[in-house]
Amino acid sequence: MTYKDADAPNEELSCQSGYVQQLTFAGCPSFMRRPFSHELSGIDLAITGIPFDCATTNRPGTRLGPRAIREQSTLQAHDAPYGWDIDPFDTLKMVDYGDCQFDYGCVAEVPAAIEKHIAGILNQGTAALSLGGDHYVSYPILKAHAAKHGPLSLIQFDAHSDTWADESVDRIDHGTMFRRAIEDGTVLAEHSVQVGIRTNNPDTMGVNIIDAPTVHALSPEEVAAKILSIVGSRPCYLTFDIDCLDPAFAPGTGTPVSGGLSSPQAIEILRSLKGGLQLKGMDVVEVSPPYDHAGITAIAGAHIAVELICLWASCR
Ligand code: MN
Ligand code: MN
């Protein structure tokens, strides 16, 4: 492990791997203390925020999610991730790419701005981990990934299927976008899986479902085995809606539903997927700081994000 002095000259601070010793509670919080940079040459992974929350059906506030997740990630930025035999933060080059820029007064232009933002990362040979934002943002992110990697299997951790039907083609929200993603061929329903579902939607669109009661009845390893058998070796994308977790573990979110996964359950499922996927990209969405308490949800979001980075690194 390489420790670098935060007071060292700038070239030392521009490190993209290793650990920077910095007070947990001080400084400008980039994700896991990675350097803020738009320079992606030789960079393996860019972490970026998508602070958009205009497609939510209930409580807003996820536009503040990326900032809160970054702040809580400093709790983990001093040490190797627990539970993995790899340390991507020491061996891979990562930057905090900052947030997607868009005009909040031109909402109709936001999807294209998000897609272009992510494509700008992927087209330089760098993978992306996105921090939402409400879950709608995953749709333009997925489109950018599919443009590069082809149709994708979706691994969706969520209390909700997000495949409900829109009343007209002119509207879309954070509960309907995956229906569109399936209909337009971005996502392959039969090779996709939703984990933690506990709301009714009779029209599954052909997506495989491991609902919350099933997760509770199985071990994390058994759940992971089911996911691997559904997705196989196909290119896949993993989206983690923080409301997959029970409100006890993630109260600060737009549409909380009781009966969900615990943090340890979700983390152990992700660890049990180690090395088994062709994982092309991932996101953590729906962290809403205004409804959070003591940073519980943002801490969970930051931990899940680190687990996703380790999973992605184990699959390279
Ligand atoms: Mn969702
Ligand atoms: Mn949800």
Image (tube, helix red, strand yellow):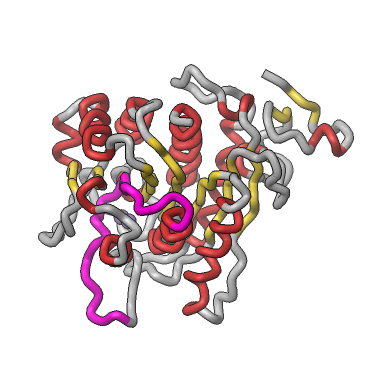
The quadrant in which residue 139 appears is: bottom left
**Is residue 182 shown left or right of residue 14?**
left
User: Which residue lies at the image location 54% right of the left edge and 57% below the top edge?
Assistant: 118
Position in image of residue 266 (x %, y %): 33, 35
User: Which residue lies at the image location 51% right of the left edge and 55% below the top edge?
Assistant: 65
Q: Nearer the viewer, residue 244 or 169?
A: 169
| Residue 291 is at least partly visible in this image | no
| Residue 132 is at least partly visible in this image | yes
Q: Is residue 153 magenta?
A: yes
**Is residue 27 shown left or right of residue 212?**
right
Position in image of residue 109 (x %, y %): 51, 77
Q: Is residue 15 magenta?
A: no
**Is residue 287 shown left or right of residue 50?**
left
Position in image of residue 299 (x %, y %): 48, 40
Q: Look at the image and give the residue range highlighted in magenta.
A: 147-169
The quadrant in which residue 238 appears is: top left
